[in-house]
Amino acid sequence: MRLALYQPDIPQNLGAALRIAACWAVPLDLIEPCGFPLTDKALARAAMDYGEKAEVVRHPSFEAFLQAPLRQAGRLVLIETDGDARLTDFRFAPGDTLLLGRESAGTPQGVYTAVDAVVRIPMAPGLRSLNVAVAGAVALAEALRQTGGFDGFP
């Protein structure tokens, strides 16, 4: 299981995703460019004391991400508000990568074309979306629960 952020705009969301990835021992794919300067120092600051515990793989573009050897196994599952499948009905597999779109601009059509599934998180009528880091945590928790990813944790 992997978590991927597509061109994140907000450093605090990246920091939250790094913490989630570290706490649940899930690699984080960071697809650039970001909407803020992403230096090693900024990445360390966003991760706070969890940075050393998170496995982060940086990709210079979406195309590079798709071609990465680690990307060749498993499905690419986009978590998006207009997903065809509800999170609670979708069956995750251990090799899946959960992809989160960009906060400000959403997910471009080229990304939709490249994914294997688009999944939505159910929410109350009239409400649009969760914060991207929160959505990542919700979706990843369900995926790990389904696939036994929490089994080795106390």
Image (cartoon, rainbow, N blue to C red):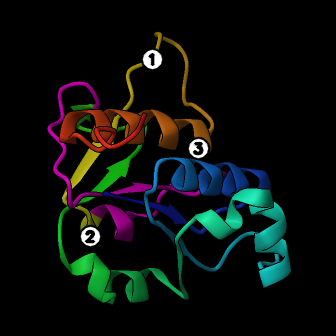
Q: Is residue 41 magenta?
A: no
Left or right: 3 as drawn, with respect to 92? right
Q: Amino acid at mark 2?
A: Ala
Task: Give the Cα separation between the discs numbered 2 and 3.
Answer: 20 Å
Q: Quick one: which residue is furthest to the top in this view?
A: 125
Left or right: 42 as drawn, with respect to 59? right
Describe the element under mark 1 as helix, strand or loop. loop
User: Which corner quadrant holds the C terminus?
Assistant: top left
Dominant SS in magenta: loop
Q: Which residue is mark 3?
A: 132
Q: Amino acid at mark 3?
A: Val
Describe the element under mark 2 as helix, strand or loop. helix
Task: Tell me what residue is drawn at x 52 percent, y 13 percent.
Answer: 126
Picture layout, residue 118 above or below residue 129: below
Describe the element under mark 3 as helix, strand or loop. helix
Residue 133 picture quarter: top right
List x then y, in percent, for residue 43.
Answer: 76, 72
The residue segment tinted magenta is: 87-112
User: Which corner quadrant holds the N terminus?
Assistant: bottom left
Picture layout, residue 49 above or below residue 64: above
Q: Earlier in the sequence, mark 2 or mark 3?
A: 2
Picture layout, residue 70 above or below residue 26: below
Q: Which mark is residue 123?
A: 1
Task: Give the Cα separation between the discs numbered 1 and 3.
Answer: 14 Å
Left or right: 129 as drawn, with respect to 109? right
Residue 85 picture quarter: top left
Task: Tell me what residue is drawn at x 68 percent, y 58 percent.
Answer: 14
Q: Earlier in the sequence, mark 2 or mark 1?
A: 2
Q: Which residue is mark 2?
A: 114
